Amino acid sequence: MNCNFEIQILRWQCIDCCITIAMVRFFVVVTIFVIGILPHHSLFARRYQVHSRIQSREEFGGLGKNSFVVCKSAASTADAINLAASSAISKLMSVCGIGYCAGRAGLLDQNTLSVLSKLIFTIIQPCFIFVQVASSIAKEAEQGLNWSLLVLPLMAVLQVFLGNIVGIFVTRLLYPTKLNSDDAKQLLACTTFGNSGPLPLVFTDAIFRTHSDSTLLKKGIAYISLYLLGWSPMFWILGPSILEDASSNTSTLTPKEKRKQLLTRVFNPPVLSSIFGLLFGAVKQLSQLCVLPGSPFHCIFDAAGSIGNAYLPCVLLILSGSLTASASSSSSGPPSSQPSSVFDTLIKKVEENRGFAIQVFFVYFSKFVLMPSISFLLIDLLRHHVPIISTTFRRDPMLLYVLLLETCMPSAQNLTVILQLQEKKKAATRLARVLMVIYLTGVPAICYWLVRILQLTSLF
């Protein structure tokens, strides 16, 4: 009787898991079909062409000179964006493939990943942030520092808090009684923090490198770097606190040790590099000392830039290496003294796959539906009800482009670095699997929002 009852339970759990996975696959297929086909539809193309002609008449004072303007159709725009998105994701996945093969070959074991994570946290990413922020602010200061650009780090902080609010709502909806579980914390972290540095830079470079206005690419890179000025401190202060164990007891620490722990968390290497980058870029004497070309110590600044260029490949190696390192270490470990039955193993596998599919679905929905929709709505309200912001966006559409681009990026791959630093190998492996699926299936959604952004800003 008990055996039949257990078989029935296993059967229903398998059916539940299959239904959940089928729902996720159906959602992804529908997203690819609707979002991928919509920009190419003839109705969309006609609307875009009408929008372009109306804008051309407005720019030329309604004198009928729009016949001299080359109107790009929505189909060609969508093709270019799809190509840029596919190229960017292909580059990322190629590096991840190399890391995965290295992990399978035993070249990226847990010790190597731990050391590489510490190098990224203490040296590589601080160099990347310092060079990007300092060079961007120094270039803006040469042309007269535009204080309206301070909206970029401010909006970065606000978008992190918005993502955190959305993440808390989704987490409480999905894990009402398990808010301290690893799955709930990973879902909250994935919703709170997006890929705000490497991926936007790749997309901006792919879209504007061949643009007729050569200044747009430099301006876009500078604005993304200024956005990181507000995002990086938030990530490295809040990220570890979200992912850390609730059981980590600090009550035994003395007040002095607690203050030291707090200062270490707040003033960590990425945060300090943001502060020094702002300082060296804004202060003319310091920028003339090492930041600007031809300065006495510019060679040191170039060396820091060369180290920072390794940031994205190293993070992707950790992301892909985490997929294999934990599994290989667990399989080579000592056997359990009490092996579980086949029934218990199947039950555990079913629950893991079901939880994985649900987590992927909610991260995908939060990052590519909720966050962009809410951000678009808020920015649209600001444009229509705050005259200063409306004027700023009209004069500088690249500023609007960067703010909207940051809202539709997938989750930050740096989260696996935090888990590696916290010695959470299994959690890093699970999160790496989630991020891989999100990045692969997120291309159509990113393309859709890029079409919307470029149509709204009229930059392409």
Image (tube, grey):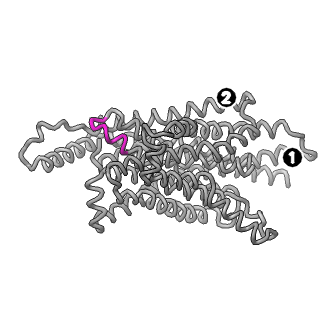
Which residue corresponds to the image point at 61% horizontal and 40% vertical from the top-left? 315
Q: Position of residue 44 (x, y in %)?
A: 28, 44
**Which residue is farthest right?**
337
Residue annotated with mark 1: 340
Of residues 190 and 155, the one nearer the viewer is 155
Of residues 411 and 284, the one nearer the viewer is 284
Residue annotated with mark 2: 101
Q: Position of residue 444 (x, y in %)?
A: 44, 41
Q: Position of residue 34 (x, y in %)?
A: 40, 44
SS for callout 2: helix
Of the 4 image quadrants, the one containing the C terminus is top left
Residues under labels 1 and 2: Cα distance? Answer: 31 Å
Q: Give the class, few, some or many, for how many residues have Cα within 10 Å of label 2's Cα (few <14, many ≥20).
A: some
Which residue corresponds to the image point at 63% horizontal and 44% vertical from the top-left? 123
The residue range painted magenta reads 211-219
Q: Is residue 184 visible?
A: no
